[in-house]
Image (cartoon, helix red, strand yellow):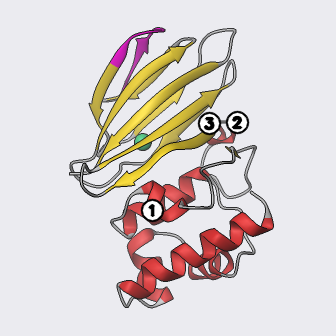
Amino acid sequence: MTDTLNQQLGHNLKSLRQARQWSLDKTARETGVSKAMLGQIERGESSPTLATLWRIATGLQTSFSSLVSGAVPHTLMTESAPPDTQSVADASSVEVRTAFPFNPATGFEVMVLTLPPGGESLSEPHDTGVTEHIMVISGTLELLRDGQWHRVTQGESIRFRADQPHGYRNPGSQALVFHDIIHYA
Ligand code: MN
């Protein structure tokens, strides 16, 4: 993300945190992201990874798009071998774009994800009751849920509970594009 987008993200985080009257210490405890990192993000000095953004959104009990609002929608956020990820699997280059930001009336947000051949992205559990509805637009998806990889081909859809560890990977030789409709209970 660019500096401007990082600053928007920092602004969002600070607003969400202050609306809850949470200190940086409290926010670090709730999200599992270090106080130092949170401070850097708030000052617009850091381009956090997708995994970190999800950890923050989940800890704040907010939607992903609320956290990245204005910082992501018109830009592709690319993850390439970020330094603070816990596994190599996260070092793939998944691209995430917000198609429709979180709507409190429906409880939905819609993301478009792109994974190159061989790309893989693992996710920690989201908040209790969060479900994902996946529609494969092009390519082939393998989805990890309940500890197993399930193949979902172009034109197929799958829904799963995302309050468990899950992941996406592209076993094919062409780019994988899928829509991810995330519902917050
Ligand atoms: Mn997810």
Residue highlighted by disc 3:
89
Q: Nearer the viewer, residue 154 or 150?
A: 154
**Which residue is pictured at 62% across the width and 9% down the height?**
172
Q: Quadrant of the N terminus?
A: bottom right
Task: Tell me the CA gap for discs 2 and 1.
Answer: 23 Å
Quarter of the figure with residue 91:
top right
Q: Position of residue 9 (x, y in %)?
A: 61, 69
Q: Answer yes or no: is residue 22 visible.
A: yes
Residue beneath disc 2: 93
Q: Is residue 39 magenta?
A: no
The Cα–Cα distance between marks 2 and 3, rounded to whole angstroms, is 10 Å
Q: In this rendering, does residue 78 appear at all?
A: no
Which residue is the site of mark 1? 66
Q: Secondary structure at mark 1?
A: helix
Which callout, 3 or 1, points at the residue further toward the start of the chain? Answer: 1
Magenta residues, as a range? 148-157
Residue at left offset 69%, top offset 47%? 75
> Label 3's element?
helix
Residue farthest toward the right in the current orientation of the protein: 3
The response on whether ligand 1 sits within 8 Å of label 1 is: no
